[in-house]
Image: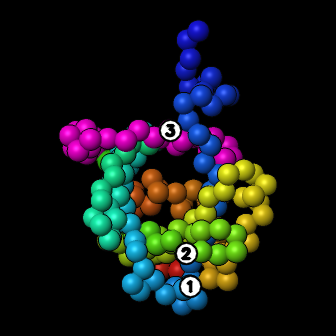
Amino acid sequence: MLRGLDEELAAHKYSHVERERRFLVDPLKRPSLAGCRSILIEDLYITDTRCRLRRMTDSVGGRVVLKLSKKYDVPDPLARPLVTTYLTSEEDALFAALPGHWLRKRRHAVPSASGEFGIHLFEGALAGLELAEIEQPDAASLAAVQPPEWARSEVTCDPDFEGGTLALLARSSAQIFVHQAMS
């Protein structure tokens, strides 16, 4: 049988379902991140695709992980199929030459009663924007997540807060967006 995108979306064979919620963070209420281990994330959102090239660098040991991912466009942002492949540095260099838009952020792990949140501190044009995300293994666990006291508002279903959309913002637009989001 010939298996294509329609079949993959109907029955996930090569992808897994990412169950995630995202929140704007109030930087004045969140726990201090000073001295916390972080991961530098550099994403290239490749033009005219749903593909993302990701470079992750650990702040402690300097380990670098390279991967290419695609999140399928589906109606439910709470359960999005995702496929990922890990790359060599040579493969990463080839994909990095493709046209696209870069996004840079640091992820800090913060425990909570609902599980571990990743707090993302954006850099560059999006400096000042802070988002938190949490993943869960199933829909019931995801629905049970209680936003921490430092979460300002949930943005899971707001496409303006998806990485690909954020990466497209020009510097002046990004600064206005961050100011409005964080005010």
Residues under numbered marks 1 and 2 in contact, where contact means CB atoms less than 8 Å apart: yes
Give the mark toward the camera: 3 or 2.
Answer: 2
Residue picked out by circle 3: 83
**SS class, disc 2:** strand
Relative to 85, is 128 above or below? below
178 horizontally vs 111: left or right: left
In three-dimensional space, the C-alpha distance between marks 1 and 3, rounded to whole angstroms, equals 32 Å
Q: Amino acid at mark 3?
A: Val
Residue picked out by circle 2: 110
Q: Amino acid at mark 1?
A: Arg
Relative to 123, is 42 above or below? above
97 horizontally vs 54: left or right: left
Residue picked out by circle 1: 30
Residue visible at 47% across and 80% down? 179
**SS class, disc 1:** loop
Q: Residue furthest bottom?
A: 28
Could you say which quadrant of the image residue 149 lies in? bottom right
Looking at the figure, which quarter contains the C terminus? Answer: bottom right
Q: Nearer the viewer, residue 71 or 16?
A: 16
Please provide the residue range marked out in magenta.
Answer: 70-99
**SS class, disc 3:** strand
Looking at the figure, which quarter contains the N terminus? Answer: top right
